Image: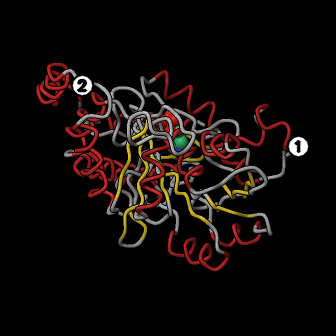
C-alpha cells in the first residue's frame, strides 16, 4: 500500500523538508481541518500519540484525582493508562459477549457519586452503541471521551465514531486504519472551549509563544507525519471498503467452521481487526504460522490481570467475558491490498485445520 503511494509521499516529504518548518506548521493545520471534516466535528487537534490524545482529552475535560472513569475491561491497556495518568480511578466493566464492546447497561451499573466520565472504546473498528451511551451520559451528567484509536471511519448510526463525545481521542500508530510513518494522534471535538484548551495543553500550556496560561505537555503531531497523513486520508474510505469486503468474505467462508465464533458483520464497522474466537487458538495459530499465515492476539492478558494494575486487586474471574476473550481471540490478516489468493489461503488453511482437529 505504501509502494503505490510512494511518489505522493515522497513529494509531501520533500515539501516539508524544503520548507524547513518541522513543528506546528501548515501541514498540521491542513491535516487537522481535513480530519475534522472527515470525522464530522468542528475541531481536530493533532498530538504526538493516541495515548497522549486520551490523556489530554481527559485533562481538558477536567478529570483528575478522585474522579472515577468507566472503561471496558476488554481493551488495549492504553485506554486505562490515560485514566491512571490523570490520577483518576479506573472503573472497568465487562464487555458484551457478542459485540466485545462496552454497553450502556453495564456502564449504568458501575455509576457512583464519583463517576465523572465514561470512555467507550471502538475496539477492532466495531462501533459502540453511541446513542445509548450518550443518552445515559446526559442523564447522569457524565463526560464522554471516545477512544477511537481503532475506529477511523466507523459509524454508530449515521455519525462517525469520534464525533459523539465531549472530547475524542485517536491514534495514527502505523498499523491503524489511518496510520502515520511513526507515532501520532489527534483529538476531535465540537466544543470550542475544549478545542482551545487542548491546543494549549499539547504545547506546554501555550498558544502564544512564551505566554503560558496553564501547565501543559509537549505533545505535538509532527509536521512530517501530518503531511503524510494528509496524503493517506484521501484513501482511507477506499481502504476501509477493502477491509469490509475481506471481512465479508471471511464471514461467509468461515461460517460454521469448527468451533469458530465470528465477529459481528456490520457495514458500519471498519474492521481494524477481524477477530475470530476458538478454544483451539494456540494450535490453530501454530498451524496457520506453519502455512505462512501470520495472526495476532489482541490482547492475551486483560489490563486488570497485568502487574501494572496489581493495586486494583482484581482477581481472575472478575471480568469473565474479558478473560474468555483474552483466552480465545485471534486476529486474522486483514489489510487493504491483501490479495484474493491470500484471503483464500487463510480460509483454506483454517478449514484444513478444523478438518484435522
Ligand atoms: C484502543 C487503543 N487506545 C489507545 C491506543 C494508544 O495509541 P498510541 O499507540 O498511538 O499511543 C491504542 C493503540 O495502540 C489503541 O489500540
Q: How many marks?
A: 2
Is 78 located above or below residue 18 in the figure?
below
Q: Quadrant of residue 335?
A: top left
Rendered residue at 59%/61% (across/down): 98
| Lower sequence index among marks 1 and 2 | 2
Query: Which of the two residues, 98 or 261, is positioned nearer the viewer here?
Result: 98
Could you give the CA–CA distance between mark 1 and mark 2, rounded to whole angstroms? 48 Å
Give the SS element for disc 2: loop
Quarter of the image with the N terminus is: top left
Residue shown at 64% from the left, 68% from the top: 142
Q: Circle 1 — which element?
A: loop
Q: Position of residue 257 (x, y in %)?
A: 51, 50
Residue under pointer 2 = 21
Closer-to-camera residue (345/161): 161
Left or right side of 282 for 288: left
The residue sitting at 43% across, 33% down in the picture is 210
**x and y percent of residue 275 in the render?**
51, 46
Amino acid at each position: 500500500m505504501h509502494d503505490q503511494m510512494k511518489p505522493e509521499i515522497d513529494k509531501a516529504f520533500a515539501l516539508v523538508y524544503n520548507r524547513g518548518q518541522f513543528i506546528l506548521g501548515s501541514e498540521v493545520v491542513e491535516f487537522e481541518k481535513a480530519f475534522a471534516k472527515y470525522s464530522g466535528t468542528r475541531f481536530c487537534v493533532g498530538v504526538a500519540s493516541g495515548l497522549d490524545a486520551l490523556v489530554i482529552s481527559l485533562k481538558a475535560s477536567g478529570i483528575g484525582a478522585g474522579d472515577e472513569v468507566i472503561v471496558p475491561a476488554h481493551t488495549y491497556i492504553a485506554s486505562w493508562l490515560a485514566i491512571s495518568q490523570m490520577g483518576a480511578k479506573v472503573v472497568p466493566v465487562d464487555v458484551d459477549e457478542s459485540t466485545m464492546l462496552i454497553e450502556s447497561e453495564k456502564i449504568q451499573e458501575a455509576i457512583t457519586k464519583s463517576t465523572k466520565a465514561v470512555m467507550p472504546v471502538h475496539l477492532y473498528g466495531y462501533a459502540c452503541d453511541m446513542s445509548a451511551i450518550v443518552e445515559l451520559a446526559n442523564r447522569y451528567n457524565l463526560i464522554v471521551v471516545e477512544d477511537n484509536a481503532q475506529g477511523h471511519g466507523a459509524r454508530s448510526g449515521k455519525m462517525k465514531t469520534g464525533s459523539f463525545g465531549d472530547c475524542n481521542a485517536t491514534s495514527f500508530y502505523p498499523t491503524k486504519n489511518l496510520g502515520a510513518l511513526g507515532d501520532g494522534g489527534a483529538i476531535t471535538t465540537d466544543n470550542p472551549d475544549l478545542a482551545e484548551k487542548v491546543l494549549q495543553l499539547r504545547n506546554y500550556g501555550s498558544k502564544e509563544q512564551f505566554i503560558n496560561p496553564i501547565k501543559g505537555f509537549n505533545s505535538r503531531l509532527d509536521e512530517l507525519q501530518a503531511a503524510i497523513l494528509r496524503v493517506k486520508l484521501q484513501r482511507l474510505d477506499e481502504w476501509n471498503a477493502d477491509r469490509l469486503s475481506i471481512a465479508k468474505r471471511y464471514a461467509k467462508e468461515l461460517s460454521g467452521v469448527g468451533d469458530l465464533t465470528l465477529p459481528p458483520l456490520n457495514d458500519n464497522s471498519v474492521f481494524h481487526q477481524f477477530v475470530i474466537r476458538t478454544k483451539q487458538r494456540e494450535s490453530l495459530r501454530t498451524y496457520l504460522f506453519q502455512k505462512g499465515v501470520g495472526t495476532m492476539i489482541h490482547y492475551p492478558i486483560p489490563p486488570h490481570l497485568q502487574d501494572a494494575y496489581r493495586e486494583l486487586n482484581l482477581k481472575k474471574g472478575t471480568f469473565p467475558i474479558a478473560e474468555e476473550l483474552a483466552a480465545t481471540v485471534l486476529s486474522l490478516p486483514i489489510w487493504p491490498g491483501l490479495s484474493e489468493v491470500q484471503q483464500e489461503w487463510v480460509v483454506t488453511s483454517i478449514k484444513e485445520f478444523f478438518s484435522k482437529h
